[in-house]
Amino acid sequence: MDDIERRHSPPISLNKQEVQSLSENVTFLQEFLEAHNSPVSDKPDPEDPKTVSSNHDDDEEMNLFRNVQNVIEEMDQIKSLAMQRNTEKVVLHDKQHSFVFASSSIGKNSSGMVVWSEGVVNGILGRLVADQRQRQVIPITGMGGIGKTTLAKTVYSKKIIEHHFDVCAWATISQQYNTKEILYELVSQATKKSKELSGKSEDELGLELYQYLSGRRFLIVMGDMWSIDAWDRIQRFFPENENYSRILVTTRLSHLSSQLNNNYSLQMEFLDEVRSWELFSKIVFGVGSCPHEVEKIGKKIVENCRGLPLSIVVVGGILKNREHALGVWESIRKNLASEVNLENDKHCMKPLKMSYNHLPVYLKPCFLYMGVFEEDYSVKVSTLVKLWVSEGFLKPMNGKSLETIAIEFLQHLVDRNLILVGEKGSTGNIKVIKIHDLLRDLCLNQSKKDGFYHVIGQSSPRGISGQRRVVIPRNTPKKKVLGDLQSMSHARSIISEYGNVPLIKNSGLLRTLHAYKFSYFEDESLIKSLASHYVNLCHLAVGVGSMSSIFSSFTRLWNLHILIVSCEEEFTAPGEIWRMPQLRHIEMTERSFYLPEPSSDDVVIMENLLVLKRIANFKCSEEVVKRIPNIKKLRIQYFGRGGIEQDDYYCLNNIKRLCKLESLNISCWYDFRASLYVLTFPQCLKKLTLQMNGGFQWEKMLEKIGALPLLEKFKLWAGCFGTGKWEMVEGQFPSLKYLGLHLCPSLEHWTAESNSIFPRLEKLRLFGMEELKEIPTQIGDIPTLQKIWMDDCGESAVMCTKEIVEEQVELQGEDLPFHVQVWLPRKNEVVQSLAGPNFEVVIAN
């Protein structure tokens, strides 16, 4: 409704008084739900407000007016009930406080089955008995089920621990912790008395613990910590004896470890193939060995556990009691998910679900959304962010953009070990994420239970007619897709990996249509009426045969935020695109598109537009700059058109006026020289990629590029060095983290006059630099350097890099902070002979 009110030419009119009343109620309910964190999250309360269901016959404006008042009345009733529940919540919360603690024998006699390397176990033991007098906190972090507690038990049970410490005690904190009960357990374990403690207050128990530990060397294990608040309430009762005392903490929250110890924490990793099989074999066969006839299928089962000890232990326990026959094991492999993830399986799914239950309400939909992607799929962060924005999971706060908030939410999920970092970008940003299969199953199960989204081809306890989000997996039968979609007139989102995407003809409520591998629409005629039927569309990411089908009535898509299209034909966008102020992201993935200049009659400023990608012959006129004041990413290509090859025509010098531009990518495929030599870039630029034809001379631009204060990533393609030299001077590229030189054949000598170059450089990539004979030796002195790639480069440059490595080995020893990787297109015995611990040589296949 706010969007409608803000629109330059609203498509419908609304009664302001009714809108204000409804808006106030909805805002109240949103704030109430965000603040309300029920301690009994799995059990529905019969007094809780029910979901409001309204009869949608929405295309007619008359029905909108008729229904608004009814909705307001229902909202008033819900608000009244919510206010009543809000006053009851505190009392309920106090009654539901619970805690879980381990018995005094938890670690002493246990022998965990998980196969840890000696390095992991000895690393923790070394920290516990290290020659450091101050009290130390040692965090162990990792996702649920990865073996944090088992590792702690393994270490806790070692004889060296029993001999080294005067007092050992263990308490599990859990989500709903109770400080008094935790202190009671620690005191009873430490003092070996419990009867005398009954009736004592929290402060009395804390004082007794403090006095008993004073002067003694102690080891306290605090398992399953969920908040720094729990630590703050208890740590004051642990005295600083200056006698090598230690506190071992296990937690699923990686960010918590830095609050406990800035210098050290152990991040648990998944088991590798060898250790996964070793653990599985011990569980299933004990001291025996795996029968040959089931070994192959057994290893496939273990591989599907993805190195998560909890999953391996559960499936191993299942197979331990089954017949060791090929048919039986093959059946388990095919039904592994259902065998491992039984709803009442407290050994597997319930421990993982604790992580979900503990999430703040605003992170829950973001996490559950990971289930819409196929198993083992590597999810691009940029894609996920756009989907979260379009689905309405985020709201502006503290002046931050929705995209910035999305990245912060993503980092929260990473810190909680609920999603995994698959790949980082060249400047350290998270680029690709993944999710473990068990956690993905948790997303699917919880989403099915809550009706968060419906996966076509699966049953739904709520039926399919009222589903709001629809997921279409790959290889779903066509008949099933067509049948289900036509029954989903209330669908707001379709997320598809299905080949040809059919449209829902009778739904005007669709907001998100994302074929995330850009499947093509089946019926081109349906696309032509897309804008007429889907006026609420916010996110459109599809593949089409012709852009004219989308642009035929483009202005009807008044609420469109994201437009990503795969189309093999060249096209020109309609001028009406400049009258769509909601647009945030426009991108073509196959061919570039032409963007016309805005008409002087238009007065709309595209304040929300942040991304423009793959624009051909972009004319950066004053009028265009005025219309896109907040643009952050710009990718443009120049081919020449209609014989126009005058640089001034494209007004590229106006790029410096884009004062919020952070990422710029320019490709030029014809003799485009004069204006570019004097081109000035905005000072806010962080990423710059320039690709020019062979005659463009880089020496004339590198000084001004090197002066950009915030530039972190710089990639140079083609062009030439007229002198054959690049001599760097002090003070250039102060913030650069990544430098890529690609296919610059005329560069022979790369030198530096100063010892201080690239003060923050982390990664250097050289590709196709066949004539390069030397690189600055000072590169080896850069303290932040992590890696150098050399792909298809000349032998002289490779030898020079090897000398840099050898020089640094002499200064720092074999354990260098950076690594060199050389890729060869063919065998080269001279270069291959240079291979060593810090110098890797790879022959391309």
Image (cartoon, rainbow, N blue to C red):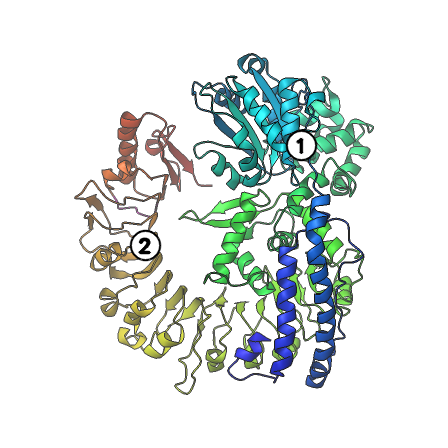
Closest to the observer, 836 or 241: 241
Q: CA distance from mark 2 to mark 1?
A: 54 Å
Residue at the image position 31 percent from the left and 50 percent from the top? 735
Say few, some or many: other residues with alpha carbon within 10 Å of mark 1 (under 14 / 14 to 19 / 20 or more): some
Q: Find residue 21 and report its horizontal and vertical position in percent.
A: 64, 76
Q: Secondary structure at mark 1?
A: helix
Closest to the observer, 613 or 144: 144
Residue at the image position 77 percent from the left and 65 percent from the top? 484
Q: Which residue is mark 1?
A: 181
What's under tag 1, amino acid-wise? Glu
**Please, is residue 842 above or below residue 60 in the view?**
above
Please say if the residues under marks 2 and 1 sit with CB atoms less than 8 Å apart.
Answer: no
Q: Is residue 792 magenta?
A: no
Region in magenta: 764-772
Let me know if residue 459 appears in the view.
Answer: yes
Q: Is residue 767 magenta?
A: yes
Q: Quadrant of the N terminus?
A: bottom right
Which of the two discs, 2 and 1, labels the residue nearer the N terminus? 1
Residue at the image position 68 percent from the left and 19 percent from the top? 193
Residue at the image position 69 percent from the left and 69 percent from the top? 502
**Please, is residue 225 above or below residue 244 in the view?**
below
Q: Find residue 683 and report its horizontal and vertical position in percent.
A: 29, 61
Numbered label tally: 2
Say few, some or many: other residues with alpha carbon within 10 Å of mark 2 (under 14 / 14 to 19 / 20 or more): many
Q: Secondary structure at mark 2?
A: loop
What's under tag 2, amino acid-wise? Leu
Q: Find residue 661 and report its horizontal and vertical position in percent.
A: 37, 64
Q: Which residue is mark 2?
A: 711
Q: Find residue 344 and report its horizontal and vertical position in percent.
A: 79, 41
- Would residue 288 be found to the left or right of residue 518 on screen? right
**Please, is residue 826 above or below residue 397 in the view?**
above
